Image (spheres, helix red, strand yellow):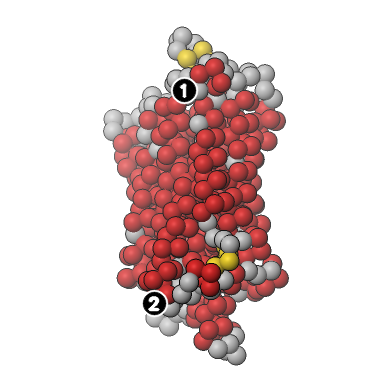
Amino acid sequence: MSDDKIQKGHTLIDWRPDDLEFWETRGKAIASRNLWISIPALLLAFSVWLVWSVVVARLPAIGFDYTTDQLFLLAALPGLSGATLRIFYSFMVPIFGGRLWTTLTTASLLLPALGIGYAVQDPDTPYGIFLLLALLCGFGGGNFASSMANIAFFYPKSEKGNALALNAGLGNAGVSVMQFVVPIVITSGVFGALGGAPQTLEDGSQLWIQNAGFVWVPFLVIATIAAWFGMNDIADAKASFKEQSIIFSRAHNWIMCILYTGTFGSFIGYSAGFPLLMKTQFPEVNALSYAFLGPLVGALSRAGTGWVSDKYGGGRVTFWTFLFMAVAVGGVLFFLSIKTEPGAFWGFFVCFMALFFLTGVGNASTFQMIPTIMRQQVGKLMPELDATAHLRQSERESAAIIAFTSAIAAYGAFFIPKAYGTSIAYTGGPDAALWAFGIFYVICLVITWFFYTRRGASVPC
């Protein structure tokens, strides 16, 4: 088939990824190009979204006198705005098209990146300005919902789970990349006079905290240009908000919101709060030297374990994931209870690495469950549809649910750091927050068993 019959401009007017011949001859190459532009754009979005998790740990050293609870609030606010924006972003790709929306949302990240770079250079910057910039970083959090919905439209059923795992997993790696890169770039004037003067610490050393924001600017410009010139829209994926809003009447949309909050909500919340949690509980440890490893483990496990759910079933993998997450939280609590003992930090750290790894596995498995669930549910709820219409409807609903559940789950980026701060403020330690997380994982385990994995489950998957 000639190019002019497949697409008009950047819009794909004949898109049949489940047609094997079409997929192998034309579709796969187009889908791959869109995926590999989407991944770095999403990676940058996560980098900007969670940049406060590192910046807050350095603010006291450069003259900003904030309480521990105020610092945890700055780390948490991007999660609040990012999750809220995801609710709206969830429905934007079918309305505006993936190419235009990816371009606009990637470009929007320049605002908080530049804002942070200038604000941290002035010690008289009001706390309210930092709160506003933290909220603006939520633009990066919103991007995930639209990115995942967009990529879901490009791939056939047989490859969708792996494609989504790659997009999400390598995109999630932006948190780890940021937590690795920022501590390095703030130690030198990499932008010269353009980057501004350094901040001098009490010991005479110098930092360029502004580089935590500025370092992303050139990459964001490149990613924006790549999205505009290299990505595609899919004509069949167009849908109004009204058409997509049917998901609000789907019970399993809300059930999967709970489960994905347990996996992705934990990943992003732990990522946002991990550096400051380590710094408050183990002040003798250079937390920023290790913080990046948690998000890295979580991102790589998500990208690398999508096939496990494809082979053994997403529901089964999710069940065992929540069981082991509850055990890992117990390990964290144990080592915090003996944190003054030799080796306690490393026990705490290993248990958290296990948590990050499990969140990645669970992120992949829950997203694998959604298309499987909706293919069964659409057939039961809309039996009048023929095979083609059934497939199209289930794909549309799956994409919308994937995006919407990611929006709800992203509130974990606010609640987990805020729970740490509140728990420390009222009880002197983070243990109460961790107990609450462990109980929630047990609830998620029971829900998974009842609806999806027990014998006679309503939607086995």
With 3 as the anchor, is 404 left or right in this view? Answer: right
Q: Amino acid at mark 1?
A: Val
Q: Is residue 377 above or below residue 63?
A: below
With 196 as the anchor, is 286 left or right in this view? Answer: left
- Residue 341 vs residue 414, the one in the foreground: 414
Can you see residue 322? no
Q: How dense is the environment of label 1, judged by Cα within 10 Å: few (below 14), some, or many (20 and up)?
A: some
Residue at 70%, 30% (x, y): give it.
Answer: 128
Q: Secondary structure at mark 1?
A: loop
Q: Secondary structure at mark 2?
A: helix
How many marks do you count on the picture? 2
- Cα–Cα span, label 2 and label 1: 50 Å
Q: Are marks 2 and 1 in contact (CB under 8 Å)?
A: no
**Residue 336 on image: x %, y %:** 39, 38
| Residue 455 sits in quarter | bottom left
- Residue 208 vs residue 278, the one in the foreground: 208
Residue at 48%, 72% (x, y): give it.
Answer: 2
Can you see residue 223? yes
Residue at 55%, 31% (x, y): give it.
Answer: 213
- Residue 2 vs residue 457, the one in the foreground: 2
Residue at 51%, 12% (x, y): give it.
Answer: 200
Q: Which residue is mark 2?
A: 21
Q: Amino acid at mark 2?
A: Glu
Residue 190's mark?
1
The disc, 2 or 1, on the residue closer to the chain's N-terminal end is: 2
With 294 as the anchor, is 64 left or right in this view? Answer: right
**Residue 116 on image: x %, y %:** 60, 30
